[in-house]
Amino acid sequence: MTEVSGLPRPGSLLEQHQAAVAAIQRAYVAIPAGSAVRLAKSTSNLFRFRPGAPGYQLDVSQFGHVISVDPAARTALAGGMTTYEDLTAATLRHGLMPLVVPQLKTITLGGAVSGLGIESTSLRNGMPHESVLAMEILTGDGRVVTATPSGEHAALYRGFPNSYGTLGYTLALTIELEPVKPYVHLRHFRFTDPAECFAAVAHAAAHGSYEGHRADFIDGVAFSLDEMYLTIGAFSDVAPWRSDYTRSRIYYQSLRGPKEDFLTISDYLWRWDTDWFWCSRPFGVQRPLVRALWPRRYRRSDVYRKLVALDRKHGFTRKLDARLGKPQTEMVIQDVEIPVGQSAAFATYFLTEVGMNPVWLCPLRLRGETTWPLYPMRPDEVYVNFGFWGTVPLPPGATDGHFNRRIEDKVTELGGHKGLYSTSFYSRDEFWNRYNGPEYAGLKRAYDPQGRLADLYDKCVRGV
């Protein structure tokens, strides 16, 4: 890869940002036509592993900073490569947080907008892109434009979510913030019937609470069809005790008891990151001895993800399994949104037919009436996100894609949607039918007419 970059500039953070914008625009325009363009990033939360390809890497390190926080207006201006770890550290100092903070520390603000994001405030606040007031975007044709809900680039503003960097790259975003309290009071509710679990989700969506507990936050975990938990969180000024899941205790296991808990707001936001939900298990980090020896600073999602990438590159697990005579496995890593009325059917299908557990459950709905063309969801619909990440043994004679293709078909059958951060197997026609091909084609013509950036189907399905 050839790396292109701009040098840091003196002056205020805003002046440095403006200089970096000018530098990256010059660097992008100078890249020869027909060359592949990618971002030079130290971390990734995508699960589309691909070998390095020749081309140019744009150095975007100058866009990984919080530029300003306005406590009075409850807004923040930050570079597109700013991680939520850094963003929340800056906003919490003012008693504020982004309206939606995705679960993993190194997810970037621009990534959560162009690739979608979700968390336990999503039933109240929708997805990260819905609280964006303005986006400064380096478009595929080399312009730097500011996209807002109205004005010249309103179509790009609405079409940017779920575009995955195929229309352009966010250089800065202005986002809304909301006030927080020091603690989150959690209550864990167990359900032994999927229908009852998702009826509780619908109740919380309608009333903003469940069994008298305010639903500022809501997510859950399905361990099996007869062991499902919803965790309802409410902001709190006080905490009779505070739990810490960065040491020997593991958050997802705590859902099984006791039924009540308290966390600081910061610890709550990153409760899933320490063990990458439950995906630290294959590395042995949940075993007491290994956990005691594994430094806390390395109990992070980005560390585990790098280990997975290393394994995928060199095939250590695949070779060991073959030597031990174990069956071939398929990586099943997906997040899908299912209408709440069909969620019991999907849970039953997935836990019975695929058999992977635990499964993350996260209710959501659009924040307002605005719709987002490349990820069409109905404004009046409550959905449940199902997140599942792991490997499943393939049946005899089956090949890679066996389970993923069936999951895609079931999601379509139940009127749901599938995120594109991992592997996809759609045909080109089906993909564009699901993700609004005509709207995307119009945006591509307007903002990347020469096709300098990858096409969304090629990037997300073909892995180009």
Image (spheres, rainbow, N blue to C red):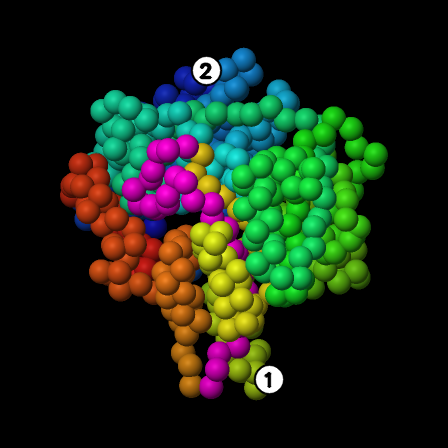
Instruction: Label 2: state its secondary structure.
Output: loop
Residue 228: say if magenta: no
| Quadrant of the drawing holding the C terminus | bottom left
Which is more toward the observer, 250 or 363? 363
Nearest to the observer: residue 314 or residue 121: 121
Q: Earlier in the sequence, mark 1 or mark 2?
A: 2
Please rate how many residues cluster around mark 1, counting C-alpha atoms within 10 Å: few if below 14, some from 14 to 19, many from 20: few
Residue at 40%, 78% (x, y): give it: 399
What residue sits 49% from the left and 52% below the top? 340
Q: Residue 8 has which mark? A: none
Q: Give how far across and how far down residue 47 sits, in percent.
A: 45, 57
**Can you tell which mark lies on residue 11?**
2
- Name the front one of labels 1 and 2: 1
Relative to the observer, which residue lies in front, 256 or 461?
256
Identified by mark 1, the residue type is Leu
Which SS type dominates the magenta stretch? loop
Say whether residue 308 is left or right of residue 453. right
Cα distance, mark 1 to mark 2? 60 Å
Q: Is residue 439 above or below residue 87?
A: below
Residue at left offset 76%, top offset 39%: 262
Residue type at the position of mark 2: Gly
Q: Is residue 371 magenta?
A: yes
Q: Secondary structure at mark 1?
A: loop
**In the image, which residues are magenta?**
368-396
Residue with the mark numbered 1: 324
Residue 340 in sight in this render: yes
Residue 431 placement, left or right of 392: left
Give the answer, above or below, for where 343 lies relative to 320: above
